[in-house]
Amino acid sequence: MNPKDIIKGRGAQQDTNNRFSEFSSELRDDFLEFCRLEGEEAHSNKTQYLPIFPKSIVNKVDSPDVGMSYSLNPYQGCEHGCIYCYARNSHEYWGYSAGLDFERKILIKKDAPKLLEAKLKSKKWKAATIVLSGNTDCYQPAERKFEITRACLEVFLKYRHPVGIITKNALVLRDLDILTQLAKDNLIRVNVSVTSLSETTRRILEPRTASIKKRLETIRILSEHQIPVNAMLAPIIPGINSHEVLPLAKAVANNGALSFGFTVVRLNGAIGGIFEDWIRKTLPDKADKVLNQIKDCHGGSLNDSRFGVRNRGDGKIAQQIHEMVHLAKRKYFKDKSLPKLNTSLHHQYKDGQLRLFDV
């Protein structure tokens, strides 16, 4: 493929059919053919921000192997454009594609802070860690403009409620003032995703994310402010970054991370086709090797939906990854651990102020 044909600044190189619309393929083909005949550009590469108005904002996570009980996503879709992102499939529920639409049509939940406050004030709500992100990055580029994540953090601080964050963007440091206040009462944990130490790999896998240097700096600064950091070395992709497990673990440990997690890549739903199209265009010499090694981790398929196995992988290649992870934990994280977040303060602040006369 001619490098000039690659859509710069985007992960996906195509828009896939929406599985919930039987007419999507036919309509798209007709539209593209019309544009070709008229000499017009079929797509704009500009990002669109589309407001939506959900009735609730805190989601119960039922999957037993995700590692969180509740999540909050201020945005749907993600301009970071990570090619492997499992959240791409969720964009189809909104009538968009898991491909370029996921990166270019960002749904904005401006009422998220108000909905969160109503949830935390509810008499039925019992404090449990709510994770910002979980589906799409709460510090993606839209956050610089809309500041919904910051407003939600202010609500968590007001009600002394525990919150986790998952991000790969250094923009989280903008909110250091709030994070340090939360940390004083052990109410915050930040998970920073670091997928590679190679900028070349980072640029093609995650085109609109913070540089590796910035992410390691983010871990260091958060740690220096006594904010617990867990590094997410995820996903591990055989043939692309699987050789980096040990150096990645060393780098995040040296910058203050107290632990790290990992997953073996799986390409569920529409992501399998999106990833295969991407790798054949961007890394054609590696494509067959990488795809075959991913399949080796999932019983001959690009995806595995079995709870407890789907994110860990199976087979010899997955076993090698697990062995490197165990070695990395022994070597670089032997005497480190994350503190458990505090859920005991929230009930005192449900009315917006400390109940001084509670016994």
Image (cartoon, helix red, strand yellow):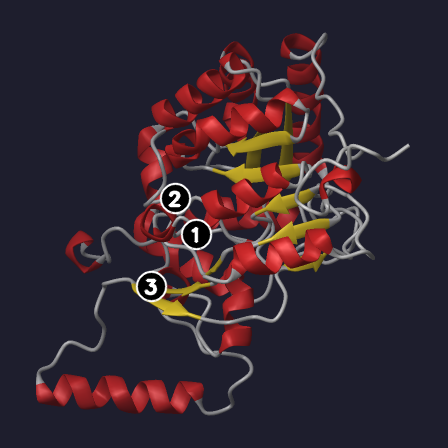
Q: Residues within 10 Å of mark 3 (few under 14, many from 20)?
A: many
- From the top left corner, tell me how far across and down residue 266 is, in percent: 60, 51
Q: Secondary structure at mark 3?
A: helix
Marks 2 and 3 in Cβ contact (< 8 Å): no
Task: Please name the residue shown 12% across and 89% down the image.
Answer: 37
Residue 341 placement, left or right of 211: right
- Choose the circle earlier in sequence order: 2 or 1: 1
183 lies above or below 305? above
**How far apart are the two marked residues, 1 and 3, measured between alpha carbons?**
13 Å
Q: Nearer the viewer, mark 2 or mark 3?
A: 3
Could you say which quadrant of the image residue 359 lies in? Answer: top right
Any part of residue 187 in sight: yes
Count of number-bearing discs: 3
Identify the mark at residue 104; answer none if there is no mark. Answer: 3
Instruction: From this view, report whether residue 232 is shown above or below residue 44.
Output: above
Find the residue positioned furthest to the left.
39
Which badge, 2 or 3, comes first in the chain's sequence?
3
Mark 1 touching mark 3, by CB under 8 A?
A: no
- The residue labelled by disc 1 is 83
Left or right: 53 in relation to 212: right
Query: Which residue is situated farthest in the right direction here?
Result: 359
CB within 8 Å, label 2 to label 1: yes
- Give the residue type that dot 3 points to: Arg
Query: Disc 2 versus disc 3: distance between alpha carbons?
Result: 14 Å
Tell me the mark number nearer the camera, choosing from 1 and 3.
Answer: 3
Residue at image location 63% in from the left, 34% down from the top: 262
Q: Nearer the viewer, residue 248 or 356?
A: 356
